[in-house]
Amino acid sequence: MDSIDLETPEPRRRWPRIALSLGTVALLAGGFYLAQNARTADASETETKKEETKVPIPVDTVAVVAGPVSSYLAATANLVPENEVKVLAEWEGRISRILVEEGQAVQKGQVIAELVRGDSEINLEKSRVRLANAEAGYERTARLHREGLVSPQDLDRASMEKQLSGQELKEAEWRLAKTSIRAPFGGRVTARAIQPGQDIRVGQEIVTVASFEPLVARIYLPERDVLPLRVGQSAKIVSKADESIAFDGVIDQIAPIVDVATGTVKVTVKAGPRPEAVRPGAFVEVRIVQETRAAALLVPREAVVRELQRTFVFVAKDGVAQKRPVVLGLEEGARVEATSGLTAGELVITAGQGGLKDGAPIKLLGAEAS
């Protein structure tokens, strides 16, 4: 019986198959690499063509100018009359007439209202009669004293009666005068607190009178900020309702004490001539000049782009936008000082810079395009 060989035949033909597979993979990888490079090159070429044909972004520009700029101490307050008082009744009675209305101008000493005068007039007549009688009695007693018919004590009593009657007449005249309520100074009636026929008592408010010239703003500043200030120093007053309305003022008073509760000092600023639109009581901002630079390079506030701690502007030059870092200085209203990064006459972009990149093509609008 023949024996069976159980040994596995040697796989002599597998090596060519493996070699063929590796070669195929290498060829496929090389083809993929070439195809990928071709696509990348095509994409790059396409992007280049897009950049070359990119439409310029329309922008507005403003030229950098040299001019004065100032820094200010600023505080808000109401513009109020320097002289404003509540006129109070100095005698009791019933209101018979009111001679002014709110908003009406009055002169110093002008009658504002009148009380019923009947009782006061009667008392005045009584005092006159009493004085006349006392004077006649004194003359009679003096004549009798010269003739030795009355004692010196009788003459003294007659003299005292005459003096008391004179004082009573003056008091009656004063009371009658107080039935006419008068303006303490020239100004305008801002409020009326009484009605005809109303009974009033001593000390009751009648009207409020205010002098609108001048108006003042009382502001409160930290003690350290007040140290360099002086009376007579100029200030600017700006309406909070419309910041285009501004007029001059001057420091009129600086309080001699510091408010211990707030640590501030009251500074009174007197307003100069003002537009008619500015009314007493208006809410304003008072700006006191701290520093002025006469020839600063100024750009519009809207031209400044802020990125974290850095600031930039875009400068329009040779048809492209140049992103330019700048250092800012003083700010006043809509203008900002650029202490570095710009020169006078350069055009900074004020509108359209939101999506700009450095080197992006631009198209100037307005007068700068011509």
Image (cartoon, rainbow, N blue to C red):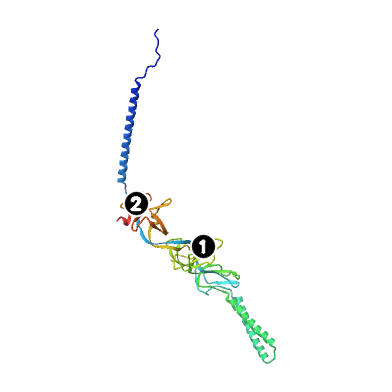
Q: Is residue 272 above or below residue 366?
A: below
Q: Is residue 177 left or right of residue 243?
A: right
C-alpha span from label 1 to label 2: 45 Å
Check the image and report above or below for 303 versus 17.
below
What amino acid is at disc 1?
Glu
- Residue 138: x and y in percent read 65, 86
- The amino acid beneath tag 2 is Gln
Estimate how packed mark 2 is, as few (under 14), some (14 to 19) or many (20 or more) residues with alpha carbons within 10 Å: many
Q: In the image, residue 336 lies at what x, y percent? A: 40, 58
Q: Going by the image, does 112 lie left or right of 353?
A: right
Q: Earlier in the sequence, mark 1 or mark 2?
A: 1
Pick the front one: 60 or 307: 307
Q: Residue 232 appears at what percent x and percent y? A: 46, 69
The residue that appears at 33% across and 34% down in the rendered structure is 33
Q: Are marks 1 and 2 in contact (CB under 8 Å)?
A: no
Per the image, label 2 sits on a secondary structure element best described as: strand
Q: Quadrant of the N terminus?
A: top left
> How many discs mark residues in the rendered view?
2
What residue is disc 2 on? 322
Q: Nearer the viewer, residue 17 or 197?
A: 17
Residue 152 visible at all: yes
Is the residue marked by circle 1 packed among few (<14), some (14-19), or many (20+) residues within 10 Å? Answer: some
Q: Secondary structure at mark 1?
A: helix
Residue 77 visible in the picture:
no
Please give the residue where the numbered disc 1 appears in the rendered image.
223
Q: Quadrant of residue 135?
A: bottom right
Q: Position of residue 276 (x, y in %)?
A: 44, 66
Q: Is residue 102 left or right of residue 353?
A: right
